[in-house]
Amino acid sequence: MPVTEFPSPSPPHPSRRSLRRLDWFVFLVADVQTGFGPFVAVYLTSQKWTQIEIGLVLTAAGLVSLLGQIPGGALVDAVRSERVVAAVAVTLIAISATVYATLPIFPAVLVAAILHAAASCVLGPAIAAISLGLVGHAAIGERFGRNARFASIGAALSAAVMGGFGYFFTPQAVFFVTAALLVPTLLVLRGVAAAEIDPERAHGNLPGMLTGKPPVDLRSLLGKPALLVFGCCILLFHLANAAMLPLMGSVLTTRSGQWATVLIGACMVGPQIVVALFSPWVGRQAQRIGRKPLLLAGFAALPIRGLLLGVVHDPYLLVAVQLLDGLTAAVMSVLVPLTIADLTRGSGRFNLTQGVVGTMMGVGASISPTFAGYMSDTFGSPVAFMGLAGVAAVGLATVWLLMPETRPAANGLRTHEDGKCRSSASTGW
């Protein structure tokens, strides 16, 4: 096939100020989202809610999170200002936190939980789109690595700070702090220059190549074999991964008694440190050696972790084993959006595809606790860990055998953002 040359506009030149503000925006968004983690159940329990009421709220939020991924991504692709979408989403989340804090009655909290879940469905894709629109495809690997680093640091620090507020004041204070973070978050976002975010790149287009061409429709998108394989790999990964930490928490509680809470905290903070340290390195290596070797490393760590959790009995060694979760998280937090960016180059559907893959993540993560709980109750926790490791091994085999390398030089699409865009029939669009 002959190679077609397309004129390209000037390469992205984001200012240092915009890049730094994006760092801090990701950090503050992680702070805001941390307030809706385990603190929700603690707070509602302190308000004399029954477990069934708490469960209904969490289930409703989970269903909205699952069903809203694809519409959320499509919405981000449809707009021309990802900053506005991100600002509206953060504002809605702050409103939800205010409702939690001031109106802890079932109808109000249910609406707030649904609002938070819906806003979160567009916030993640909006951050990825802003990142891609700022730096372009050539530098997006390292940018996603920085995003993962600042998100990890923000989540770890805010969990400690909000836990302190909940302990020294009331659980309600966590949601007041979350709502108050709206102001600095919006101020930081305002510092990301709108003129430096290319809307075509932000949607997965290649400026100068696809001008006037309509975006790829959902049916064509789902017909791309590499995307289907990748989505199945992600589903298997989260099916294996989601239940490992909760199941280990139950094991630690039975084995270590009063130290269980401290050990579980260490199991949560330790991997966050690993993610913060290694995510930018993962992004750089993905640009240098390709995506598939790193995906294989991330997937390979998961069955190893499952096997070790099933055979190790010392509680402190279990905490050390849990550090492998940091390795997989460092890889997946960078490689998932990066691979999606590769697979959607020129499609105009980067954010919609994030929603599709996010839905498959949610399906895997929602099945995982039930699968692990059944295995644990029926055969014991060691067998449950082995079962999760087996699912992870299937995911690893799928990546190894079926997942192609998606780095542009390997999949037939080469972009030179400092001069020309080259397209061949192998792009599939």
Image (cartoon, grey):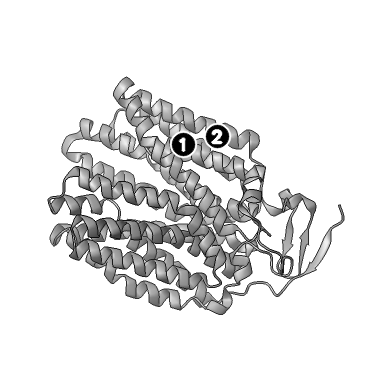
Vertical arrangement, residue 180 with respect to residue 392, above or below: below
Q: Residue furthest right?
A: 2
- The amino acid on which the numbered mark 2 sits, given as a three-letter code, is Leu
- Let me know if residue 413 appears in the view: yes
Vertical arrangement, residue 263 with respect to residue 11, above or below: above
Q: Where is the C terminus found, in terms of image quarters? A: bottom right
Location of residue 151 in the rendering, given as x and y in whole percent from the top left corner: 41, 59
Q: Mark 2–mark 1 contact, CB under 8 Å?
A: yes
Query: Mark 1 — residue?
Result: 302
Left-right relation of 51 to 323: left
Location of residue 46 in the rendering, given as x and y in whole percent from the top left corner: 14, 52
Q: Secondary structure at mark 2?
A: helix
Q: Residue furthest front?
A: 107
Left-right relation of 168 to 419: left
Residue at the spot 25% in from the left edge and 45% down from the top edge: 55
Mark 2 residue crowding within 10 angstroms, few (<14) / some (14–19) / many (20+): many
Residue at the spot 53% in from the left edge and 73% down from the top edge: 81
Residue at the spot 59% in from the left edge and 34% down from the top edge: 398
Indicate which disc residue 316 carries.
none
Left-right relation of 289 to 253: right
Between discs 2 and 1, the one toward the N terminus: 1
Give how far apart the Cα atoms at labels 2 and 1 are. Answer: 9 Å
- Let me know if residue 269 appears in the view: no
Residue at the spot 40% in from the left edge and 52% down from the top edge: 65
Mark 1 residue crowding within 10 angstroms, few (<14) / some (14–19) / many (20+): many
- The amino acid on which the numbered mark 1 sits, given as a three-letter code, is Leu
Q: Secondary structure at mark 1?
A: helix
Location of residue 209 in the rendering, given as x and y in whole percent from the top left corner: 74, 66
Q: Depth check: give the residue in front, 420 or 6.
A: 6
Q: Quadrant of residue 152?
A: bottom left
Query: Mark 2 — residue?
Result: 396
